[in-house]
Amino acid sequence: MLSQYSPTEDQKLNNLLKDLVSGMQTILKAKFLGAYLGGSFAHGGWDHDSDIDFDVVIESDLTDTEIIELTVHHTKIYEMGSYWGKHLEGAYFPKDILQNLDWTDQAIWYLDNGSLTFERSIHDNTLVNRWVLREHGLVLAGPPPRRWIPPIPDEKLKAEVRQTMQDWGNEILQGGYPLDNRWAQTFAVLMYCRMLHTLATGEVQSKLAGATWAKVTVDRTWTALIDDAMSARPGQYTKISHPSDPEKVKLTKAFIAYALSEVGQI
């Protein structure tokens, strides 16, 4: 049970997670199979500017009534007033989808960071998310996540990362994903560092771990840009309202083009 241990080093967060999971269990009853922390809390790269990535494994898909009740519950957690409660992001995975590595095209119920509205999305239904959960996921309730997730072949994981790099990179370079605020511009730099790191190592680590690796691995041309992105991490979500520097946007797009050129060489 969650109350018998502390899944993180932050006791306020532990208390919030206990309330979060307890409410889920009350609403979902026997449909609830497990709840886990992923993301930076799982692989150890979290800090006090992180969001909280969670995944809930359920026997079958959520009903309309359950979505309404869970929305009320998540709103209650959000309104507690803590930073953590306002930066929860996660998905409710039917176990059959989570167990099938070929079903990453299935939209599942998802809550975006800071949102109180459930949406159907494939955002969390990825091999990257499964890999982090399987290898490092923190149990909030239920059996170890390996109970639900089979081993993920290295090349299958890397193929997904390559595809993400290409699809998102094309979107950015063609103006479909604007880098017009400081958060988006630095997020893109750190994410491409992280994805290059995964292709090189077969592991999924934090964005800052990926950036630290990239600084000593990629062409030194990009060191200053990576340092700048890392320096913007404190208070990251306040940067959404800060316009980005046009010169840094230009450099970021050049870095993405460089990363895409490296995809077939790692």
Image (cartoon, rainbow, N blue to C red):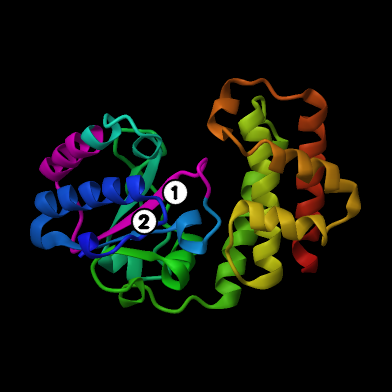
Please tell me which residue is depicted at 34% across the width and 50% down the height of the picture: 11
**Span highlighted in magenta in the image:** 47-75
Instruction: Inspect the image, locate mark 1, and give the three-letter code of the amino acid beneath it.
Output: His
Q: Is residue 50 magenta?
A: yes
Please tell me which residue is depicted at 77% across the width and 65% down the height of the picture: 264
Residue 217 position by quadrant = bottom right
Percent coordinates x, y for residue 64 in the rendering: 14, 42
Q: Is residue 216 magenta?
A: no
Asked whether residue 167 is in view, the answer is: yes
Q: Residue 214, labelled with which disc?
A: none
Give the left or right position of residue 8, taking residue 231 as reference. Answer: left
Q: Quadrant of the C terminus?
A: bottom right
Residue under numbered circle 2: 106
Instruction: Inspect the image, locate mark 2, and give the three-letter code of the amino acid beneath it.
Output: Gln
Secondary structure of residue under mark 2? loop
Percent coordinates x, y for residue 139 in the rendering: 32, 65
Secondary structure of residue under mark 1? loop
The answer for how far apart the CA atoms under marks 2 and 1 are is 10 Å
Q: Earlier in the sequence, mark 2 or mark 1?
A: 2
Give the left or right position of residue 67, taking residue 202 as reference. Answer: left
User: Against 140, is 244 above or below?
Assistant: above
User: Against 200, is 220 above or below?
Assistant: above
User: Against 83, is 18 above or below?
Assistant: below
Viewer-closest of 24 and 129: 24
Percent coordinates x, y for residue 209 in the rendering: 65, 58
Residue 161 position by quadrant = bottom right
Disc 2 crowd, CA 10 A, few/some/many (<14, 14-19, 20+): some
Viewer-closest of 13 and 252: 13
Residue 112 position by quadrant = top left
Disc 1 crowd, CA 10 A, few/some/many (<14, 14-19, 20+): some
Callout in the foreground (2, 1): 1
Residue under numbered circle 1: 123
